Image (spheres, helix red, strand yellow):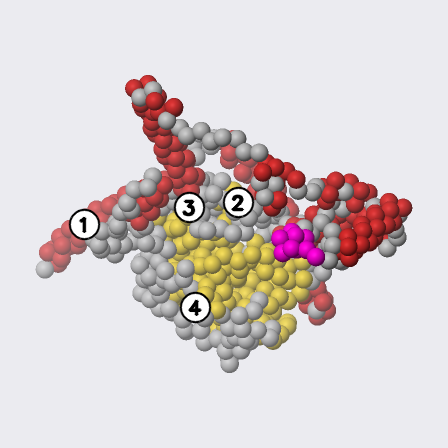
Amino acid sequence: MISSVEWVPQGAADPTPKKYEMSPAELELLEKQAELEAALDNEDDFEDDDDDDDSYDNEAENPTTKSSKISLPPVDPKSLPADLRMDDYSDDDDDNDALKGSHIGNLLVGKETDAEMLLEAEEEAHQDDDGKNDKKNSNYDVDSDDDSDDDLADVPDTREYMPVDVEGLESMGLSHAAGVLNDLADNDDDDDNASDIDDINLNPDDAMICVAKTEEDFASLEVHVYEQKSGNLFVHHDIPLPSFPLCLAHGDVNADGGVGNYCAVGTFSPGIEIWNLDILNPLEPMCVLGGEDTTAADELMKLNMMRAASGKKLKKNKKSGNFGTPGGLKPGSHTDAVMALAWNKIHRQVIASGSGDCTVKLWDITQASSSKEDKCCASTFQHHTDKVQSLAWHPTEGTLLATGGFDRTVALVDARSADSIKKVKLPADCEALAWDPYNPQCLTAASEDGTLMSWDVRKFDTRTPLWSFVANEYGGVSDLSYNPSVPGMMVTCATDKTVTLWDTQNSVSGDNVIAPHPCGNKDMGVGKLYTVSFYPSSPWLLGCAGAGNELSLWDLREEMPVQNRFQDRVSEAAKQQQEQQQNNDVEQQEGNNMNDNKEQNFEAMMAAGDAATEKARTKAKKKNKKGKKKKDKVHRKGA
């Protein structure tokens, strides 16, 4: 099953990813091991010096030790048996190496040179002489027979040498052919290495998508690459996960405040794992937000590795129950599965999470280091009475968060204040939420019974939707997404295995607001669909997946009805985005010039908002008390 997909924007991934990267904890451990080994080597050297000094002292006290050694008389090599005369062995093979190497070309093509013919004539003459000697000496003893059997110098070599056997040719000193064949083999290896590098490295037009996949008892985060020119889709690399994944969110800020390519993964465990997508074989996530407190176990592992390096006995973990706080969890952690994630695109260090424990939490990833872990959870909201299924940050207002849960409500939350929360009811459990990027005042929700509803959040208090209709009667809508490059294009997926495109351009504002118009439907052929998303860097590509355990992509460039309806909007949208980006850059530059010395992190902003809220609450309480006193007085007069 594939529970979630998440596109990586173009340019966010490293074009030359690494195979492995050492974590700070691993580097620290290796440094400590090196220091320990150096200290042990110094101790061994010191002990060896002491042993040498002791032996020197013993020799000085007992001068007869040297003279006590037994001296053997010299031995004449000629007096030894023939099989023990090592100096008399023939070196004909070594002497002929140069000759063999010089004529390898003729050996390969089957031609014989004059030198080879001379060698063959000498061997034949030698064999004839041996035959004559055998006829003359018919009476021979057993010892001479054994010696002739052991002497293999006269036995001809009948082995056949194949020119493709590079190692065999090299062992015989046939360097010329071996060099040629080695060049051919090296070229083949170079081609294979180049092919492997091409598969690993990314091209500028490659589209990367993350897939949360579960197969039986194995869970993984698969990173797929789609080559848009050739239409080739393949798994670039995968990351094993300790628990079944439920949701994904992409971001570009790490725990040190640096920029990279990261994916947050929510699973059935209470922790949120942040993985570096630019590393092919990571052993552990970059950091974990919440979850089990493994500090004591990590320290014990480091201590045991140090003791093992020094040859000491390992320590065992005491059976004292859970680590850290009661329940074995880090401070501020969720206590149930993480079902929804949303990475803020304005305040890029902020991640929102929704859980089965009915809470919504805000995390500051830059506080995820071990020294600041207790400050990582910036805020907790408890406005839902059932599991929180979906989250969505506003595209331009970085503090406005939409949440939806199984309590059949959709809520708007101002992240600066826990009291500023507004709710509306749904006809069924909320499955997905999405903001219209070209009409950011419009929030759309999909429910389990197939109903789609949209609200103007400026009139959210009225609880009246702009439009509401049943998009799928036979399968509930499981996910929806707006196209960030084409105004008015929305897509939904359902458990009836289909994806549907909608035109929402006339469903935004005005007196004659109408429901979105369906403009395309397709069975994706991968079973029931649970997730769908548009590629943010291309207007005509979307991906979906579900129960079929396969990722399916739909390239809309080949769909002429879709092109006829939406093609003209792309150029206008590009112009609007360019103008908006220029205005944002100017405003950001002006803000940076005015507030160079007044920058605040997200935690400080939250603290300021809480303080203002508390002040307003205190003032309201005072007013209520005064009002009650006045009413009591009026009541007495009337009586």
Mark 2 or mark 3, earlier in chain? 2
Q: Position of residue 421 (x, y in %)?
A: 36, 56
Labelled pair 2, 1 in contact (Cβ < 8 Å): no
Height in image: 179 above or below 357?
above
Mark pair 2, 1: CA separation: 54 Å
Height in image: 299 above or below 451?
above
Which secondary structure class fits the magenta region best? helix
Q: Position of residue 129 (x, y in %)?
A: 81, 51
Mark pair 4, 3: CA separation: 30 Å
Name the residue: 55% across, 65% down.
532
Q: Which residues are magenta?
A: 139-150
Position of 118 compared to 549: left or right?
A: right
Mark pair 4, 2: CA separation: 31 Å
Name the residue: 41% across, 35% down.
34
Q: Which numbered disc covers residue 625? A: 1
Mark 1 or mark 4, earlier in chain? 4
Towards the viewer: 6 or 425: 6
Mark 3 or mark 1, earlier in chain? 3
